[in-house]
Image (cartoon, grey):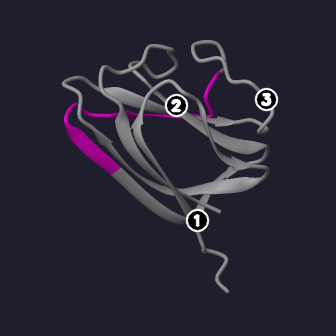
Amino acid sequence: MSTFLSHSAFYAAQTTTVQTVKAGTGALTGYYIYNPNSSVAYVQFFDVASGTAVTLGTTTPTLSIGIPATAAANLFDGTGLEFKNGLKLAATTTATGSTAPSTGLDINVLFR
């Protein structure tokens, strides 16, 4: 069994509802994200335990990725970015904000 084995999760029309991708220690090993909006949208990733509340606009994301208007972005890295407590995500109109994009993003996440 490879140490690069990933699991996947798909979030259709993702906006400001914070999703728990993985509870507990893990790593973000890749993503494919499509932004159908006419302006940039951001996916915020948080390193917090599954029972911990994330308050968008207040809780600082561990990683925030800007996705260009009507475009997609992807990355695969078998090593991954470690999340020690858990992995959560949400989509917003700014890198650290709390406003939902007018149309949700389609997010595919790879993790282990």
Residue 16 in the image, given as x and y percentages of width and height? 50, 24
- Looking at the image, residue 73 sits to the left or right of residue 81; the answer is left
Label 2 belongs to which residue? 90
Q: Residues under labels 1 and 2: Cα distance?
A: 19 Å
Label 1 belongs to which residue? 7
Q: Residues under labels 2 and 3: Cα distance?
A: 14 Å
Ranked by sequence position, the earlier of labels 1 and 2 is 1
- Magenta stretch in the rendered image: 60-73
Residue under the image location 26 percent in, 34 percent down: 68
Q: Dividing the picture into quarters, in which one does residue 6 lie?
A: bottom right
Question: In the depicted view, which residue is nearer to us: 105 or 48?
Answer: 105
Residue type for callout 2: Ala
- Looking at the image, residue 43 sits to the left or right of residue 4; the answer is left
Residue under the image location 29 percent in, 26 percent down: 40
Rendered position, 5 above or below 45: below
Residue under the image location 64 percent in, 22 percent down: 60
Residue type for callout 3: Thr
Dot 3 alpha-carbon crowd within 10 angstroms: few under 14, some 14 to 19, many 20 or more? few
Label 3 belongs to which residue? 52
Mark 2 residue element: strand
Quarter of the image for the C terminus: give it: bottom right
Mark 3 residue element: loop
Residue 8 in the image, given as x and y percentages of width and height? 53, 61
